[in-house]
Structure formats: structure tokens, C-alpha cells
Amino acid sequence: MRKRMAGSKMVWFPKQRWVVTLVALAIGGVAGCGSPVAEFRPNVGFQLKTEAEAEAQLTSGQQENIATILEGLFGTPDDPQIPEVPGVEMAQLLDETALKMAGGAVAVDEDGRTVGLYRQHCAHCHGITGDGMGPTAEFLNPYPRDYRMGIFKFKSTPKNSRPTREDLHRILHEGVPGTAMPSFRVLPEDQKESLVQYVIYLSMRGEMERLLVPEALGVGELGIEGDQLFLDMSKKATDNEVFVERSVYIQEQLATIGNRWLNAQSDEVPAPPENWGSEESLARGRQLFFGKGACSGCHGNFGLGDGNTTFDPEKPFLDDWTKENWPVLKGEEAARQAPIRAAAGILEKRALRPRNLRLGVYRGGRRPIDLYYRLRHGIEGTPMPGLEISTGDDPKKLTSGDVWSILDYIRNLPFESLSQPHEELRNLKRERL
Ligand code: HEC
Ligand code: HEC
């Protein structure tokens, strides 16, 4: 059993302790257990987008059914569960003790350990569901990460791969500089580990939900028709075949989701070339920034993040999360969805800017290796592309040495004079005339 921590915040005022206890009892009396039951919210943005694509709408029965299935697999915010997946070493991914430490309401357990760490430290930004829609979110730019797509920006793995656990640990340790994401380096290691696991847990749950919605709308892999429930418990006895088929589908998808996390591996980073850090390498990097690397189109001729391609108001840069929440809709569907979107509290649409590289603030970390990963693999979920590299045979492609040279140039930008356009820029202007 957990003791509620509502009162312990007031411990500094011993005389008032009894008041707090009384208040807690009074609330408990009304609400049943001291606070409103925390719930996982449905992914309304994804649902609306899929409904528009499917030209169909989820019935309330189908919505409930999806919630029930997800609860069966992952439990509730107060009682998180690890789904059992045959053939997948879920124990290597998620550990029940860790999950219980991060999940649930903020409290102190029998052994005096604080539990409910996610709600204590993260939920006000990232939301109980990990949808990035906590109460603080609307005031922040960039918005807090929505984990439900399984997409993370600052990682050591190639595109379309999950981050490694170490990547998530690094984010917790360092925070994301230049954004509201704070560093949690003061937390003990076991607490950070439990939070990392909880992020993975919420992300897996979110991904599973994203598979069930299109299935129920008839645009998924199984091609289910009509207003059927995905798993109709009442038909388990009479229509066992369908029931088994769909249960197997869930297991298979869960296995894929789980394995993606289990198999995430940092990409190998080739050693920098010998002349790395030299004037020569810097000059090469500068050339590539404007030339083959094609960075200036977005980051601008001065690296200020104001490239030509960012000024078209018709085509703002949007990240994947915004694109999902704000799909382009036709008149009638737009009118139907607008109030639903507003009621669900979907965050306002915002354009994304390429980074101002003159500031020298790198969200994904400023170690050369962090920046190498950024340039090599881009920033997933955003228009920032990665660089194709070859061993040198293909003149159109860059070599890993070139990537290191661009990195030399990037790291020099905060110190480079703005008032004197360098050679490359002058040539570029002449070409345009
Ligand atoms: C004050 C708000 C705030 C709090 C509190 C907060 N975060 Fe964040 N978090 C953010 C923002 C904002 C971003 C997005 C940064 C970006 O996109 O550049 C983010 C991003 C992340 C990411 C994604 C990094 C990536 O590579 O994409 C993870 C993981 C994360 N936070 C975990 C946590 C955890 C775990 C906690 C609690 C221990 C937490 N955050 C607390 C605001 C917050
Ligand atoms: C299509 C537009 C586009 C191109 C081309 C592009 N970038 Fe970016 N870049 C972005 C955007 C957008 C961001 C911000 C993404 C975010 O953090 O959400 C970004 C972020 C960055 C960052 C910040 C990383 C961090 O950790 O904060 C660096 C460094 C960077 N870009 C370098 C480059 C270099 C070098 C090139 C060329 C090889 C390049 N970019 C090409 C759009 C672009």
C-alpha cells in the first residue's frame, strides 16, 4: 500500500499537520480515494486524422473497446502493467518495480521510497499519457515531446530507429539545452532508470493505440469492415476464430514494437580525419555548408536559421507531431473536427525554425559525437535531413570526413564575424546576379 503524500509537503509546519490530515480525509470522503482517478487520454489528433483519411468515424463503442484493450495490455496510470508478449524478452525492456516507481500517484511506499516519479517530475509538461499535452505545454516552445509516435529527436541511432536507453538517460541527465526540458541529473540512478522505462512504456502504449485506431476504422492491415468492435468480448465464445486472429495480431504488433526498442543500437561513428580542427578542414566544411551539404538553404547564408526555404508562409516547416494534429482538411470535415480538436486541447499549430547556428546552443548535446549524429542522421520528426555518406567513390555523396569538416564549420560559426561575408558567400551572390 502507498501512503498518500498530500500531507507530507506541509511537514515544515508541524502544528498544521492535523489540518492537512482533516482536509485529506474530507477530499477522500468525496472523491473516494483522495484524488481524481488519473486516466490515459485517447489520441484524438491521430483519431481525427485517420477518420478523415478513412472517411469514417469511430463509434463510441469502438472508442471504448480500444481503451479496454489498451487497459488490458498496459494497465492504468495508477497501475501500470507490462504486456506479456510471447517470444519477446519484455523483462529486458521493462521491469515491474521500476514501472511502479515511476507510475502512479506521488507517494512514499512502505520502504520509504518516493513513487509516482513521472507525475512528480514530468507529467505537467509531457502529460499523464505522454501526449506532450500537460498543463504547462501550451506555454512552451518547442512543445514537450509527445512519446506516442515512438519518434525521438536526439539519439545515437539511425533514422526510423528507436533511441537507445543510454540516449534517454543522456536526455534526462543533460536536459535539452535551449528548451524547457530540464536536466534531472540530481535524481538517483534508480529513479532515472525508472523514468526512462516509463517513457518507453508510454511510447509503446501510444504506438499500440496508433495501430488499433485504423484497424477499427477499416483502413488497417486486417481490413475489418463496418462498425465492428476490434475485440468483441461478448463474441469470444461464438466467434472464436475472429477473436483468436485479432488477439494474435495484437501480440505480433506488440512484439514488433517491443523489438524495435530492444534492438535499438547506436550507430558507429568513424574517427575524425587527421586534419580535423585545422584551417583546412574548416574551409572545407564552409564550402560544403553552402555546396554539397546544402545546409544554407535552411540555416541561411549566415547560419542564423533564416534560409530562403523558411520564408514561404504557405509552406511552413512543421514537425511530424504538428502535421498529425493539423492535417489539411476539406470544408465539411474541417468544420466537424474543429470543435473536437479544441475540446481535446490539441496544441496550437506552430511552425518550426531551423536552428540559429550562431548561438552555439545544441539541443541534442554539444559533444562532437552528438553533433556528428545530428548531421549524419538528421533530426527525426523534423525537416532537418541526414547526410548520405559514401566511402568516397560517389562524388555526389559526402565522406564521413566531410561530415566532420562541416562540424568544424558549425562549431566555428558562433565565433565568425557576421559583417564580412566570406569567399563562398561572395561567389554565391555573384552566381545569382
Ligand atoms: C518544463 C517542462 C518539461 C518537464 C518538466 C519535462 N520535460 Fe521532457 N521535454 C520538454 C520539452 C519542451 C521537450 C522537447 C525538446 C525539443 O523538442 O527540442 C522535451 C523532450 C523530452 C524527451 C525527448 C527527447 C528527444 O530526443 O526527442 C524526453 C525523453 C523527455 N523530455 C523526458 C522527460 C522526462 C522523463 C521528464 C521527467 C523526469 C521530463 N521530460 C520533464 C519539457 C519538459
Ligand atoms: C530542410 C531544412 C534543413 C536543412 C537542409 C538542414 N537543416 Fe539543420 N535543422 C533544420 C531544422 C528545422 C532544425 C531544428 C529541428 C528541431 O530541433 O526541432 C535543424 C537543426 C540543426 C542543428 C541543431 C542540432 C541541435 O542539437 O540543436 C544543427 C547543428 C544543424 N541543423 C545543422 C545542419 C547542417 C550542418 C546542415 C547541412 C548538412 C543542415 N542542418 C541542413 C533544418 C534543416
Image (spheres, rainbow, N blue to C red):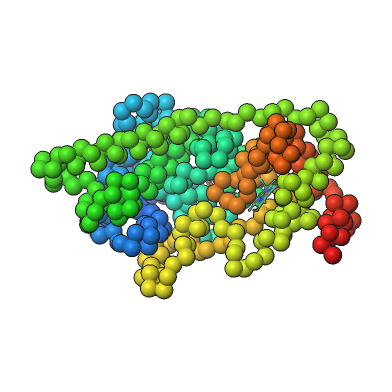
Of residues 79 and 299, the one nearer the viewer is 299
Task: Tell me where residue 185 sits by quadrant.
Answer: top right
Of residues 193 and 317, the one nearer the viewer is 317
Query: Is 154 left or right of 274, judged from the image as shown?
Result: left
Query: Is 332 left or right of 381, judged from the image as shown?
Result: left
**Residue located 89% across and 51% down the image:** 423
**Residue located 33% across and 46% down the image:** 221
- Tally the numbered discs: 0
Q: Is residue 332 visible?
A: yes
Residue at the left extreme of this rendering: 238
Task: Classify the position of the N terminus by image quarter.
Answer: top left
Q: How far from the left and from the top, in percent, is residue 203?
A: 43, 42
**Residue located 51% across and 37% down the image:** 161
Task: Tell me where residue 345 sits by quadrant.
Answer: bottom left
Q: Is residue 187 visible?
A: no
Q: How far from the left and from the top, in percent, is residue 294?
A: 72, 50
Query: Is 81 left or right of 264, judged from the image as shown?
Result: left
**Residue located 36% across and 43% down the image:** 208
**Residue 263 drawn above or below residue 351:** above
Q: How far from the left and from the top, in percent, is residue 359?
A: 75, 51
Task: Classify the position of the C terminus by image quarter.
Answer: bottom right
Q: How far from the left and from the top, in percent, is residue 399?
A: 72, 35
Task: Tell me where residue 369 sits by quadrant.
Answer: top right
Query: Is 423 left or right of 60, judged from the image as shown?
Result: right
Of residues 126 and 222, the one nearer the viewer is 222
Of residues 391 and 310, the one nearer the viewer is 391
